Image: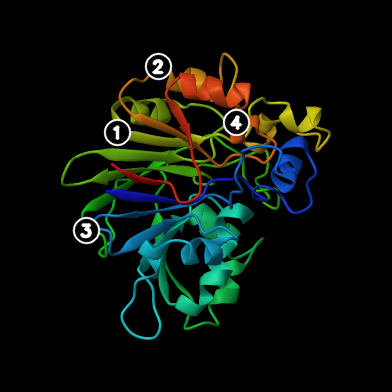
Amino acid sequence: MEVVVLGSAAGGGFPQWNCHCRMCRSVREGTSRAQPRTQSSIAVSDNGERWVVINASPDIRQQINASPQLCNADGLRGSAISAVIVTDAQIDHTTGLLILREGLPLDLYCTARVEQELTSSYPILTMMSHWHSGYRIHSIDPLGDSWQIPSVPGLRFEPVLLESNAPPFSANRNKPMPGDTIGLKITDTFSGNYLLYAPGLAKPAPEVVSALSDASCVMMDGTLWTDDEMILAGLGDQRGSDMGHLSVSGEQGMLALLADFEKPRKVLIHINNTNPILDPDSEEYQAVAAQGVEVAFDGMTLTV
């Protein structure tokens, strides 16, 4: 299985256009070695020719143009993208569905809960029906079995129920239901290796721990270094846990969780612009690296 990181930052990207925190200033002013990042999205393929995009960020056009793997096509129009999966209805994971309208119709996989949000409170799918009949929806049962996508027959996708939070615009905000957020276990059917992708995770439920145990590679939520990071930076009044994200540091944080598993390659993704791990010279980045954990960057490629 081939994996390309299209975008590695959390919502707003890095630097965020209207943010003047220490990290964003350091990029604009060139005072750190931190590199700009677009909003989180990955693409997977079984042969490098046909690709499935997982989470369509607002930066999807820029990400595709920066990824030659995804631009290949026969004829005057087209791309190597054969399907899209969205793991939640968050704006930073779904706004790209608008940008992909020129490529419709296109297969879209999501849970019934996400489809409901995207046709009611945030009606992207309703809007897109005016472009070549819109997206062809395939429903994911968040508690169901794995499935395959015909264009990438060498891959099998399995939902992993995640404890997170519903989007701010959702009626389920702060009272999420199963299916509001899922992770994905993506298995290469030839090798048996699998990737666990979980960019939004508030608590490590048993399903997550089980999926971590035999994974060949994991790409996990790296949004905030500390739970109160946004508060201390003067940029908000919510903790990461309120937004549905497990902090990277701390006794119950992501690094502590990943330390219990030796097998997989470990990568943090969906990194907020305030998180100091974006600076490769920071103590926080060095603490991550010391545990054998990588920090995702745009254009990063992996073979699983």
Which residue matches tag 2? 260
Most extreme residue toward the right is 234
Front disc: 1 or 3? 1
Q: Callout 1 environment at 10 Å: few (<14), some (14 to 19), or many (20+)?
A: some
Tell me how far mark 1 sits from mark 4, CA to CA. Answer: 23 Å
The residue beneath circle 1 is 216
> Which mark sits nearer the N-terminus, 1 or 3?
3
Q: Nearer the viewer, mark 4 or mark 2?
A: 4
Q: Earlier in the sequence, mark 4 or mark 2?
A: 2
- Is residue 245 visible in the rendered image? The answer is no
Specify the amino acid type for callout 4. Ile
Q: CA distance from mark 4 to mark 3?
A: 36 Å
Residue that numbered label 3 is attached to: 153
Q: Secondary structure at mark 2?
A: loop
Q: Residue furthest top?
A: 251
Q: Tell me the mark number nearer the camera, choosing from 4 and 3.
A: 4
In the image, residue 151 lies at what x, y percent? 27, 65
Measure the C-alpha gap from mark 4 to mark 2: 21 Å
* Real-space CA distance between mark 2 and mark 3, rounded to the nearest whole angstrom: 32 Å
- Looking at the picture, how far across and down is residue 154, in whole percent? 21, 54
CB-based contact (under 8 Å), mark 1 and mark 3: no
Between 232 and 20, the residue placed more toward the observer is 20
Q: Residue at x 30, y 64 (%)?
A: 50
Q: CA distance from mark 1 to mark 2?
A: 14 Å
Please tell me whether mark 1 sits on a helix, a strand or a loop.
loop
Q: Which residue is mark 4?
A: 277
